[in-house]
Image: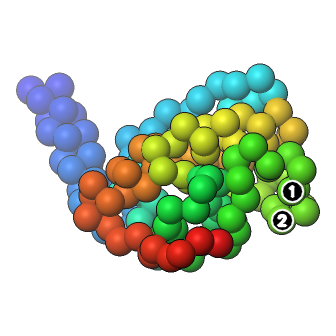
Amino acid sequence: MMIRRLVFVMIFGVAVLGAVPGRVVAAEVGSRVPVPGGAFANVTAPALKKMLEKKDFFFANVHVPYEGEIAKTDAFIPFDQVEKQLHLLPTRKDAKIVLYCMSDRMSTIASETLVRLGYTNIWNLQGGMVEWRKQGYPLISGSGK
């Protein structure tokens, strides 16, 4: 009987926490991806959408060629030029930096590069702009940047 009550309380607690709007839960953030020098975190499109509501991070599009962007993007840095363009990034290596590209292939490479260079708070949009659009979120398009 006591175990049933405990299980009920635990399930109820999880349900209540999951219903709180605006929270980014661990399942939405995704997995930590270990790479030489440390790790970066994958983030889902719904979690990033919530994070952008109270943006507290540097947000960079690393896709080449330019094929659009997500609103509130701070910089456009080609994935294969990240190491040469560190001056565009926050100077603190513990600053939260979220990277994205079209599919997440280029942003994964850029994330690995930044971790190798000592950055410790790197996030990667899982599925990139393709997944962002699939979730029904808008992209800003342009003739190029």
Quarter holding the N terminus is: top left
Q: Is residue 117 left or right of residue 1?
A: right
Q: Give me the residue at 27% from left, 55% from top.
A: 134
- Three-letter residue code for mark 1: Gln
Q: Secondary structure at mark 1?
A: helix
- Three-letter residue code for mark 2: Leu
Q: Is residue 29 left or right of residue 119?
A: left
Q: Give me the residue at 25% from left, 39% from top.
A: 10
Residue 80 sits in which quadrant?
A: top right
Residue 110 sits in which quadrant?
A: top right
Real-space CA distance between mark 1 and mark 2, rounded to the nearest whole angstrom: 6 Å
Q: Is residue 45 visible?
A: no
Q: Position of residue 136 (x, y in %)?
A: 26, 64
Label 1 Cα crowd, 10 Å radius (few <14 / some 14-19 / many 20+): few
**Tag shown at residue 88:** 2
Q: Give me the residue at 12% from left, 29% from top.
A: 4
**Tag shown at residue 85:** 1
Q: Position of residue 99 (x, y in %)?
A: 62, 53
Quarter holding the C terminus is: bottom right
Q: Secondary structure at mark 2?
A: helix
Reply above or below: 3 against 46: above
**Nearer to me, 81 or 52:** 81
**Tag shown at residue 30:** none
Q: Are marks 1 and 2 in contact (CB under 8 Å)?
A: yes
Q: Is residue 132 visible?
A: yes
**Nearer to me, 28 or 11:** 28
